[in-house]
Image (cartoon, helix red, strand yellow):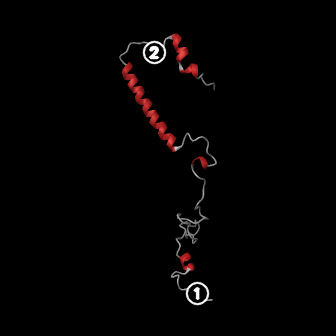
Amino acid sequence: MTKRDDNPIDPVQRLRDAPRCHARAKSTGERCEAPAVRGWRVCRVHGARGGHPAGKAHPSWKHGMRARGWTEERKWLNDLMREAREIEGLVWADAPDVPLFSANRASHHSISAKWPARRH
């Protein structure tokens, strides 16, 4: 059986030319000689394709309230509320001491009537 000459690169040579793992041994300081996984700088033994997926697919996912998108939304909302309090302070700075709610309306329209206080 003879070798075909239509392939200019020997298949074994192609494997030899593959990029190598960048991991180094702690004891000797020498690099790993295994081929790196495509798209990674290290081989499969040294962590390529390792770890869990991010987000809801992660096994430790709880609720997402600390996710990057939600954190940005919360910061935006906090800034908006801070500006609203500043504006409210400017509006009511010169007003006489007038209660916002009368005594009989406070129990009917207050937030605490809809959501009772939490017990600790």
Q: Secondary structure at mark 2?
A: loop
Amino acid, disc 1: Lys
Which residue is found at the position 58% from the left and 21% from the top? 114
Label 2 neighbour load within 10 Å: few <14, some 14-19, many 20+: few
Residue 16, picture quadrant: bottom right
Q: Which numbered disc flags the more N-terminal residue, 2 or 1? A: 1
Q: Position of residue 92 (x, y in %)?
A: 39, 19
Q: Position of residue 89 (x, y in %)?
A: 39, 22
Q: Which residue is farthest left?
A: 94
Residue 28, picture quadrant: bottom right
Q: Indicate the quadrant containing the N terminus: top left, top right, bottom left or bottom right.
A: bottom right
Q: Position of residue 77 (x, y in %)?
A: 46, 34
Residue 80 relative to residue 52: left or right: left
Q: Indicate the quadrant containing the C terminus: top left, top right, bottom left or bottom right.
A: top right
Task: Mark 2 and mark 1 in contact? Answer it, CB < 8 Å.
Answer: no
Amino acid, disc 2: Leu
Depth-wise, is mark 2 or mark 1 nearer the camera? 1
Q: Secondary structure at mark 1?
A: loop
Label 1 neighbour load within 10 Å: few <14, some 14-19, many 20+: few
Mark-to-mark CA distance, 2 and 1: 94 Å
Which residue is found at the position 60% from the left and 65% from the top? 44
Q: Position of residue 41 (x, y in %)?
A: 52, 65
Picture disc at residue 13: none
Look at the picture and state if 2 lies above or below 90. Answer: below
Picture disc at residue 3: 1
Look at the picture and state if 6 lies above or below 68. Answer: below
Residue at the spot of label 2:
100
Look at the picture and state if 70 lies above or below 24. Answer: above
